[in-house]
Image (cartoon, rainbow, N blue to C red):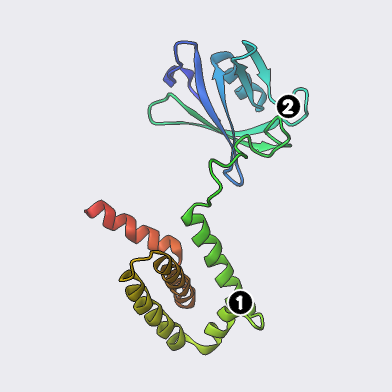
Amino acid sequence: MTVNPDNLKFDERGLIPAVVQDVKTREVLTLAYMSLASLKRTVETKETWFWSRSRNELWHKGETSGNTQKVVDILTDCDGDALIVLVEPTGPACHKNETSCFHNPANTHENLGAVLDQLYALVEERERERPEKSYTTYLFNEGLDKILKKVGEESAETIIAAKNESLGPLVAEVSDLLYHLIVLLVARGVSLDQIQQELSKRRAAR
């Protein structure tokens, strides 16, 4: 853990933002600010020290609560004006006793990518365990040809739904198609990461 303060850009108040992440999960725990003095304390003690903008003083994370953070590494961004502090937390990072200070969702809707990841994981579980009375189990038991047939059917139904004035049927059919496509990907051993990488390459080429 080597950080050269000479390569950092502190703002006009002598502070630099520090994003604290769990070194194992990479979950963002908090966003705080470090002064040169708190950064040096952090490096020396291998525990996080910050500058409190409200109290205008140094503060040692966990000094009163006991929820200290053991520093594993400190990373700087390309411009040297922000830090990432990788830690092993001994307790909640938030003063509201939450693991992360970012526990309030910006909205009530899950990100589509997260939903697809969850669905993919569930379909993988169904393939491994084959629980009875599961439609997904039925598809895997029937084999690849049955899965491909369903993908074809759902594609056709999506096209038909797209011709309707109402958008509800289209949303439903696209959802069915995505589900069956994920079943196909799991059956063929293709990950969502592979799809993402391919889409990223195509985006860069456009």
Which quadrant of the view contains residue 42? top right
Q: Is residue 151 above or below residue 52?
A: below
Point out the image quarter for the N terminus: top right
Q: Is residue 118 above or below residue 50?
A: below
**Which residue is at 56% across, 47% downward?**
108
Which quadrant of the view contains residue 163? bottom left
Q: Could you tell me residue 79's position as x and y percent?
A: 38, 27
> Which residue is at the far left?
206
**Which residue is at 48% across, 71% downward?**
179
Crowding at mark 1 (Cα within 10 Å: few <14, some 14-19, many 20+): few
Q: Could you tell me residue 186's position as x and y percent?
A: 49, 73
Helix, strand or loop at disc 1?
helix
Q: Which residue is mark 2?
A: 62
Q: Which residue is mark 1?
A: 128
Label 1 or label 2, whichever comes before in sequence order:
2
Q: Could you tell me residue 135's position as x and y percent?
A: 57, 80
57 horizontally vs 181: left or right:
right
Which quadrant of the view contains residue 157? bottom left
